[in-house]
Image: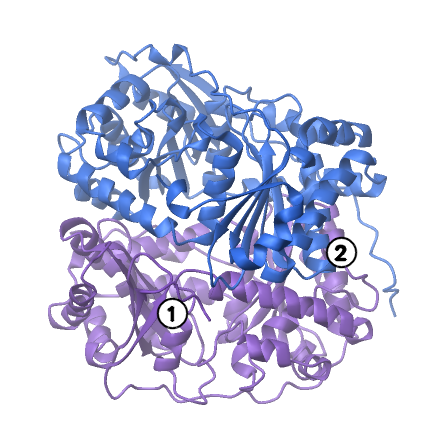
Chain colours: A purple, B blue
Amino acid sequence: MLRRPVTDPTTIQLPAERHRLDNGLQVILHRDHRLPLVAVDLWYHVGSRDEQPGRTGLAHLFEHMLFQGSAHVGVNDHFRLVQQVGGVANGSTWYDRTNYYETLPAHALELGLWLEADRMGFLLEALTDEKLETQRSVVRNERRQRVDNAPYGRASEALFELLYPEGHPYRWPVIGTDEDIQAATRSDVEDFFRLYYAPGNAVLTLAGDFEPSRALDLAARYFGDLRGERAPTRPTAALPRAAGQSRRALQDQVALERIYIGIVTPPISHPDWNVLAVLTEALVGGKSSPLQQDLVHRRQIAQDVSAYLYPTELAATWLLVATAKPNGDGDALEANLLDHVRQLADRGLSEDDVARGRQRLLAAALADFETVDRKAELLCQGTTYFDDPARAVRDLAETEAVSLDRVRDAARTWLEPDRCSIVRVVPATEPAGTA
Amino acid sequence: VIDRRTPPALGQAAVSRFPTIDRGSVAGVELRLARQADSPFVSLSWVALAGGERDPRGSEGRATLTASTLDEGTSRSSSSEIAARVERLGGAIGSTADWDAGYLRIEVLARDVAAAFELVGEVLLDPVFPEPEIDRLRRQRLADLQALRERPSAIADVALSRAIYGPATYGRLLGGTEATLSQLGRADLQAAHRELWLAQGLCLVAAGAVTREAVEAWLEGLLGGTKLAATNASLPAPTVPPPSDGRRVILIDRPNAAQSELRIGHLGVARTHPARSQLQVLNAILGGKFTSRINLNLRERHGFTYGAFSRFTGRRHAGPFSVSAAVANPSVGAAVREVLAEMDRIRQQPVDPEELSDARDYLIGVFPYTIQTAADLAGRLEDLAQFGLPDDEVDRHLQRIATTSAADVQAAALSFLSPDDACVVAVGPASELRPQLADFGTLTEVAVGELFS
């Protein structure tokens, strides 16, 4: 089949100005006039991987505290001020980073900068025990909603304990354990802020409808006099390589068995990451992909099948997930999944499948470039992880160049079925819940 | 040194309007198009008045099964060939149905629009509903039904609909049950396609880098010889839910659940109700945004939940009003009390002027953010098309929001919120919840199995 490039990749750009204030804060500016909007995205290079065992979940609990007001912003005022101009705001915590963002009507850019600067500079003045207690309760409910009271909710925690050895910073879940969320103290929160929430550990991206010189002036005005310590050296870890297969069965109150197959692959900075991304999309992306066709359509032994490649800095988890049919044969489904993984290395995928995988990733990237909030996120990610705001554009070119041979080589190198970790969530014989 | 004590003064907000909608009509099919010349994408969507509201009693699931089988084979292309034709271009095709309509959607890169035209034309006009694909999708749905019975949030949603609507249309399962699906056959789906999809009321919605001229030229070639069925002239009348007779509590036992799913709701209003804009302001203040009364109360004041939200679901006939939250087991009774009190308070007292302007400004100001992509625009056009709303409806809706007063909000609350007639649904450990819920109304315990059959 003819390869058709999405468009000429050299015409896809994400042009951005890059500045660094004296206090180390990086400021990335990208103009987009199509709508009167501006995205303000602030990434701190700290995440759950910087936590200590016994204090897991602290980065995420801390993220909640950043919405509880600062010296000049009242307790519910962050959301109130953003929403009253028609903005949206949120934050998210991940293994490697934490971010805070607002997408605002363009005329409210200065409001976003004022809000973000206030909590970067003056959070602790407004921190109280009462606020911490309330958010601890909110976060424990968030964990129950996402993990403990969700079907299959505990599967990925079990899988990551198989994939990552004791002491590896990806071993524990981003949201933390319920025990650790309860144990976090106010001084833990204060220390976390002092250590990590410094201008030199952050990237501020503005994307949207603004005049860059004015935006830079405003950023300098609100952030320029903030000071902070240099962030501590971050924990790193060698890429874990499993000696053999490992597995665990979990009983859960579910109707259909689900199988999780995971393997540790190299980090997002590794040249094979984009290759594995194409492989993943080629394998299960879309109804016409080989795994959907074989397991869901032809044999009909899976209710659904999906795969993920984590965009993480120390190692990238590759995950293949399939749900069995009612009273289905979980052993057969697992064997089929592993056989497909084996075939990636043996016979490889077809040229059509790899071309489809590339094309779907390129179209997804173009869709990302359609919204100012997503562009701001990509610029932050590129700068934070790669010291390269336009990394997303380079990823497009690399994706476009991924060949059939490279996909097979990456599968041979990284996706060895004999080194997989497998978690099977099976319907509980008794309604067991989490007790 | 700068003064950080007060938020910066802001300039004037730009006025945003919905893009101009191009209209056309070809062979009885109404076209609505929002051109976004610089988009890399084109979104096309056939909208047919073929929603679940038209499923005959006992044939629930016909609309969704028809829609999901529509793109599973034509006389020229198999299911996998259809998918492959669009997926190798980086595009996607899919068809689905809700209560009000059926939708056949495709999104492709702008340069592939010719392929999209060809494919969605073929799929709309020439589906063959292959038996093996019907069987497969029916089995998928039956397995989904089993999975839903173990998903607390899904159980709560179904229980609330059942409590509000009883045997009326919206109280049934849109996707059907084991009993109704087992007797739906290929002939039923073919008839639904012939009578409801290729029928008057069919609309085409287009957004992105495409012109009206191009779409019309294609439609003329495609539909030149097609005669649309007339059966859509009369849409089904609403099936009326039983009158409410005081507050009711429905409890569904999940003995070891780590948390409870809570829903509080009652009958709401139709999508096209004249008070819809005022209701959106009311709902924003009550439970429709992060800084709403219900979320600040349950989450930020009490820490009962990760989040609590309310909504008036818009459908052709009166959809539900509902409040949703996942709540810590010991706090369920207290959470119910707070929600009912908030519903009552917004009826009894006018909202504060600042709360009102915050809500209005939020709803108006957030609008451009919600129409950034071709798919966003296509979604808006689908809504207008299926309810026959005028092209300027979005702008008029925003204007009505801007002029909604505190008295309007209170009047809407008095007319459309009924805390004393609400249904309270909780899915969690019954032994722990029963004593907490006893005071709120007649308590009925329902088995999960009853809800999904």
Pointer 1 local density, CA inside 10 Å: few below 14, some 14–19, many at least 20: many
The three-letter amino acid code for the residue at tag 2 is: Leu
Quadrant in which residue B363 is drawn = top right
- Viewer-side label of 1, 2: 1
Residue at 17% x, 31% y is B74
* Image x and y of residue A405, in percent: 18, 70
- Number of other residues with Cα within 10 Å of mark 2, as a class: few under 14, some 14 to 19, many 20 or more: some
Can residue A410 be spotted in the picture?
Answer: yes
Q: Chain of mark 1?
A: A
Residue that label 1 marks: A155
- Relative to B21, is A165 above or below? below
Please identify the residue farthest to the left as the structure is shown.
A347
Q: In this picture, is A9 found above or below B264? A: below
Q: Give the vertical position of B198 relative to A175 (above or below).
A: above
Q: Quadrant of residue A65?
A: bottom right
- Are the residues under marks 1 and 2 on the same chain? yes
- Vertical side of A111 occupied by B424: above or below: above
The residue at which mark 2 appears reads as A111
Residue A208 in sight here: no
Q: Which mark is first along the chain, 2 or 1? A: 2
Residue shown at the point (18%, 35%) measured from the top left: B73
Give the secondary structure at mark 1: helix
Q: Residue at x 49, y 43 (%)?
A: B157
Amino acid at pointer 1 = Ala
Could you give the CA–CA distance between mark 1 and mark 2, rounded to whole angstroms?
41 Å
Residue A123 lies, in percent from the top left, at 76, 72
Q: Position of residue A114 (x, y in %)?
A: 77, 62
